[in-house]
Image (cartoon, coloured by chain):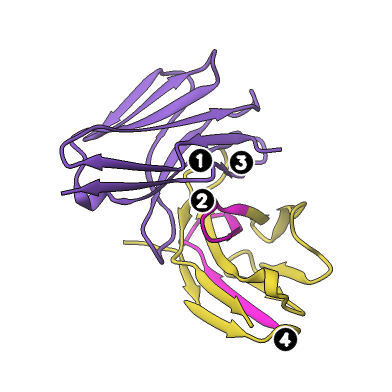
Amino acid sequence: EAEVAQSPRYKITEKSQAVAFWCDPISGHATLYWYRQILGQGPELLVQFQDESVVDDSQLPKDRFSAERLKGVDSTLKIQPAELGDSAMYLCASSLGQVNTEAFFGQGTRLTVV
Amino acid sequence: QQQVKQSPQSLIVQKGGISIINCAYENTAFDYFPWYQQFPGKGPALLIAIRPDVSEKKEGRFTISFNKSAKQFSLHIMDSQPGDSATYFCAASQVGGSEKLVFGKGTKLTVNP
């Protein structure tokens, strides 16, 4: 069964260090999302890609966060420098797009900043 | 501004009982309403979804009821089982628009044996 792959599953980093997360969406899915989920809350969108283009990054803290999807397939989310408040689950999701909005989520990366 | 409000925050049900979770939305442009189930340490998994052209959708023990005029929708879990114990999130999006999912804050469901 096709699934969204994310790595690493867990990451512990010291504040002010750089950290990166990787996502490989389901093959053929044009739309890719990065969500952040703080413990006990619902996921909140950080950035949305349609193929290699950013569609929505209005909630991405651009002074420290960056995201890319260079060839319109896999994607990387980077935080530099990490802050204590960045501790959360980072979820990647993908969908076919083009009015098919059924989104499938990966297992997520649990980030702990110490 | 919270666009999707979900209640209750937590719910305890006995095995065999009915679990009901409610959501209300503000943006009338929303036209896709999924429910996600999330187990600890896992990503959310799509459970069931509805479009506003129908008032109810049923899949097995899971039913979504939708009230467009009240801008409310709910998830009913019939014959709740201990394996249903998880956190449930409602969400909404605009098909053909930004398509991003806006989530509620979640309901932690516990089904006692």
Tell me the chain of label 3. Answer: B
Q: Quadrant of the N terminus of chain A?
A: bottom left
Taking the spot 48% from the left edge, 45% from the top edge, the residue there is B106
Q: Quadrant of residue B98?
A: top right
SS category of the residue bearing label 1: loop
Q: Earlier in the sequence, mark 1 or mark 4?
A: 4
Q: Is residue A92 above or below residue B21?
A: below
Q: Are marks 1 and 4 in contact (CB under 8 Å)?
A: no
Q: Please check whether the numbered discs 2 and 1 fall on a single chain.
A: yes
Q: Are marks 3 and 1 in contact (CB under 8 Å)?
A: no
SS category of the residue bearing label 2: strand
Check disc 4 and report the residue beneath it.
A17
Check disc 1 and report the residue beneath it.
A100
Q: Please check whether the numbered discs 1 and 4 fall on a single chain.
A: yes
**Tag 2: amino acid:** Ser
SS category of the residue bearing label 3: loop
**Tag 1: amino acid:** Asn
Q: Are marks 2 and 3 in contact (CB under 8 Å)?
A: yes
Q: Are marks 2 and 1 in contact (CB under 8 Å)?
A: yes
SS category of the residue bearing label 4: loop
Residues shaded magenta: A18-44
In the image, which disc is placed on residue A95?
2
Q: Which chain: purple? A: B
Q: Is residue A34 above or below residue A13?
A: above
Q: Is residue A74 above or below residue A31?
A: below
Q: Quadrant of residue B94?
A: top right
Q: Marks 4 and 3, how far apart in space?
A: 33 Å
